[in-house]
Image (cartoon, rainbow, N blue to C red):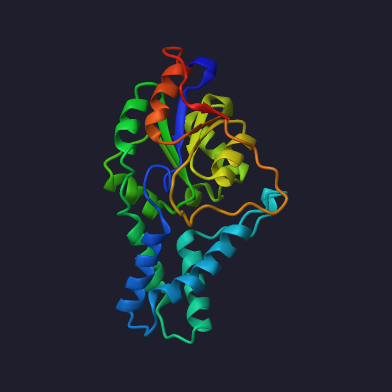
Amino acid sequence: MMAGGIRFIAFDMFGTLVHNDAAEWRAALHAIAREQALGIEGDALWKEWSAREVAFRKTRTNMADPAASPPFRTYRQAWRDAFVDTFRELHLEGDAETAADFCVDALTTHEAFIDAPAAVEALGQHARLAVLSNADDRFLDGTIAHNGWAFEAVVSSENARAYKPDPRIFATLCQRLGAVPNEVLYVGDSPYDDVHGAGLAGMRTVLVRRDQNTPGRTPPPEATALLGPDFAVGSLAELVPLAAALAGETPARAERS
């Protein structure tokens, strides 16, 4: 068992283990515009659609009273609705169902960051590994398979019926693992969804400072005082000595926040 009661390391997926930058999303919207012969540039489609997608992420969880959050919608459902509204706004005869499926399928092929495969393998020597991601099952499972990974537990927002930073999704992870929150080290790239959410749930947290424009990071509500991470790293490689240090093997080298 790792020192301090840490038995598990749980990862966010998109933006933490695999790429999820705005350029990939713009490319997907360009492909949709081209394949559906919409007669519009992909960037114009992206601008309208992404504004609606961000609005969904900002309003899907009531952190003051999570049980009073709006009825749960999967990403696929929310993306379809965003395309319906976008096509209507732009006076386009687009197929929203096909466009949403394209986005889902595109996510299943997102590649791991260069530091991720070796770090995941090494960290498995120090703790039991899990994934907790704001994602639909279809593209989360597909991405894990595409990158050749296996985890002890995989919790998606779809199967938990809640989105980070809602404490209910973190409780689902603990239930699946048979763990209490302070036994879990949670690793993610979002200060709000990942660090703040996991910290509120009682987990120790690691912020991975990725140098990319990640559209999946939910903007925090205004005037929200965010909890800071217990540790911050520039790459997943830095997690390996951190895990060893938590196991009492070597001094910690990751930046303490």
Q: Position of residue 31 (x, y in %)?
A: 32, 71
**From the viewer's perspective, is residue 77 above or below residue 168?**
below
**Which residue lies at the image location 41% right of the left edge and 55% below the top edge?**
21
Closest to the observer: 141 or 216? 216
Total numbered circles = 0
**From the viewer's perspective, is residue 150 above or below residue 242?**
below
Closest to the observer: 236 or 129? 236
Q: Position of residue 215 (x, y in %)?
A: 48, 57
Q: Is residue 155 left or right of residue 70?
A: left
Q: Position of residue 32 (x, y in %)?
A: 35, 73
Closest to the observer: 141 or 146? 146
**Which residue lies at the image location 39% right of the left edge and 25% below the top edge?**
240
Q: Quadrant of the C terminus?
A: top right
* Residue 107 at least partly seen: yes
Q: Quadrant of the N terminus?
A: top left
**From the viewer's perspective, is residue 35 above or below residue 253?**
below
**From the viewer's perspective, is residue 12 above or below residue 20?**
above
**Which residue lies at the image location 56% right of the left edge and 46% below the top edge?**
193
* Residue 152 at least partly seen: no
Q: Position of residue 142 (x, y in %)?
A: 32, 51
